[in-house]
Image (cartoon, rainbow, N blue to C red):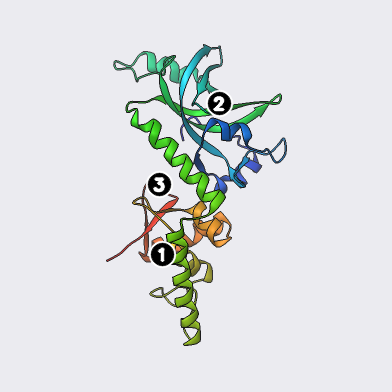
Amino acid sequence: MPGSQSNDSPNSKRSYGKDTLRPVTIKQLQDATHPHPDAEYFIIDGAEATQVTFVGQIRNISTQTTNVTYRMDDGTGTMEVKVWIDAEEFNGEENQAVAKPKPVEQGYARVWGRLKAFNNKRHVGANIIRPLQDFNEIQYHLLEATAVHLFFTRGPPESATAQQSKTGGAQANGMANGHAAVGGEGLPAGTSQATKKVYQLISTLPQGHEGVHVQQIAMAGNMEVSEVLKATDDLNGMGKIYSTVNEETFALLSF
């Protein structure tokens, strides 16, 4: 995202493939565990969380020379959100004929950024903060954060688990009949086992209209995100899947 504050160090570049964007509540950010002081991520519900997004009410705005600090409250807790000021961009916005809507005190806003810890105090370093135009987004966000929390703590819905069991049974029958049990039907000869596995997971994992995110595929298949990304590139090239809302969310291409 524009204005990203991630460092350009080799460590940050190596972790690029593991970047995620997770909907959360402020209480989850407060309860998140930090593996070690130099880690660029926190652990929420047993999973790595790099970039996060949440919706809250702005209780206070404090403008400094280098940043603007917003005190946010979403009903589960409060958290400071810091947006660093880019002088050139700031002056450019002042000269625009039509200014973009700006967050105001007591108004609601959505934040995208990274959870950070400094001097034993946590804050979110924001890439973007924008005021809400539709207050239905508040309820939508809380429902989305709840659904993701339940997925990580309780697993997929029972209907999806039953579907996976049914698919597993079909694969076992295929093994008995001498067929491949990886779920690679319709894939070209020579397709790697990892690519077949990812194709099978995309076919069976629960998904809405947006498809399945690579992080979800990696967790379900006990695979590295980089391995999943390579497999999705292969499947995309074969015309078997397509990206939906972003470059890391995929759905099957049906004919």
Which residue position is annotated with label 3?
246
Marks 2 and 1: CB-CB under 8 Å?
no
Identify which residue, 75 or 197, lies in the foreground. Answer: 75
Q: Earlier in the sequence, mark 1 or mark 3?
A: 1
Where residue 5 sits: x, y (%)? 56, 31
Residue that sits furthest to the front in the current view: 158
Question: Disc 1 versus disc 3: distance between alpha carbons?
Answer: 19 Å
Residue shown at 55% from the left, 26% from the top: 77
Q: Secondary structure under badge 1?
A: helix
Question: Disc 3 versus disc 2: distance between alpha carbons?
Answer: 30 Å
In this view, the mark in front (3 or 2): 2
Residue that sits furthest to the bottom in the current view: 177
Which residue position is annotated with label 1?
203
Res 77 label: 2
Q: What residue type is disc 2 on? A: Gly
Question: Disc 2 versus disc 1: distance between alpha carbons?
Answer: 39 Å
User: Quadrant of the rendered structure where residue 124 is?
Assistant: top right
In this view, the mark in front (1 or 3): 1
Identify which residue, 228 or 155, lies in the foreground. Answer: 155
Where residue 160 sits: x, y (%)? 44, 60
Residue 148, above or below 170: above
Mark 1 crowd level (few <14, some 14–19, many ≥20, 10 Å Cα):
some
